[in-house]
Image (tube, grey):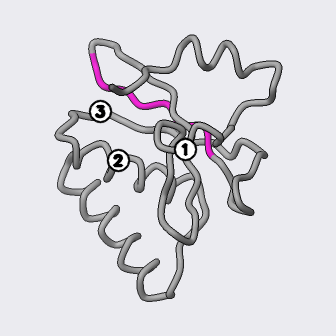
């Protein structure tokens, strides 16, 4: 992660913490996903997230594409819940694709061990 990206992510997290909640935006979803993946020592080139129009426990779920390089693009679903961020890897019930697209997503999703 570049210094600028790290500073922006830290600033966003500081604002969220100061406001006593979480910002529910594609940018916040990307920052939360980056933090989770980098905590696992994964090298990430970029993350792009879009509002899926679907929800989990009242929170918007986001469709994200993570570029690990080479090119190695991996789809993720993430929701920013009051209890913290959750991805479809931890919460298989989390959906960010309509049912007619779900099978294609699952075929392309990288499943963590």
Residue at 47% over, 36% down: 89
Residue at the spot of label 2: 34
Pointers 2 and 1 in contact (C-beta within 8 Å): no
Image quadrant for the C terminus? Answer: top left
Q: On the rendered structure, is 39 left or right of 113?
A: left
| Res. 37 mark | none
Q: Is residue 26 magenta?
A: no
Query: Residue 7 in the image: x percent, y percent?
Result: 25, 64
Q: In the rendered image of this protein, does residue 70 appear above or below residue 76? A: above
Residue at the spot of label 3: 45
Residue at the spot of label 1: 91
Query: Residue 40 in the image: x percent, y percent?
Result: 22, 42
Looking at the image, tell me whether mark 2 or mark 1 is earlier in sequence order.
Answer: 2
Looking at the image, tell me whether mark 2 or mark 3 is earlier in sequence order.
Answer: 2
Disc 1 crowd, CA 10 A, few/some/many (<14, 14-19, 20+): few
Depth order, front residue of 100/29 = 100
């Amino acid at each position: 992660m570049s210094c600028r990206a790290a500073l922006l992510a830290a600033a966003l997290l500081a604002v969220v913490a100061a406001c006593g909640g979480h910002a529910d935006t594609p940018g916040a979803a990307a920052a939360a996903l980056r933090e989770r993946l980098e905590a696992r020592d994964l090298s990430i080139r970029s993350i792009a997230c879009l509002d899926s129009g679907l929800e989990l426990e009242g929170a918007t779920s986001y469709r994200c594409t993570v570029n690990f390089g080479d090119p190695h693009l991996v789809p993720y679903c993430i929701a920013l819940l009051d209890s913290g961020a959750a991805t479809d890897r931890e919460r298989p019930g989390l959906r960010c694709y309509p049912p007619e697209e779900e099978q294609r997503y699952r075929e392309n999703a990288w499943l963590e061990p």
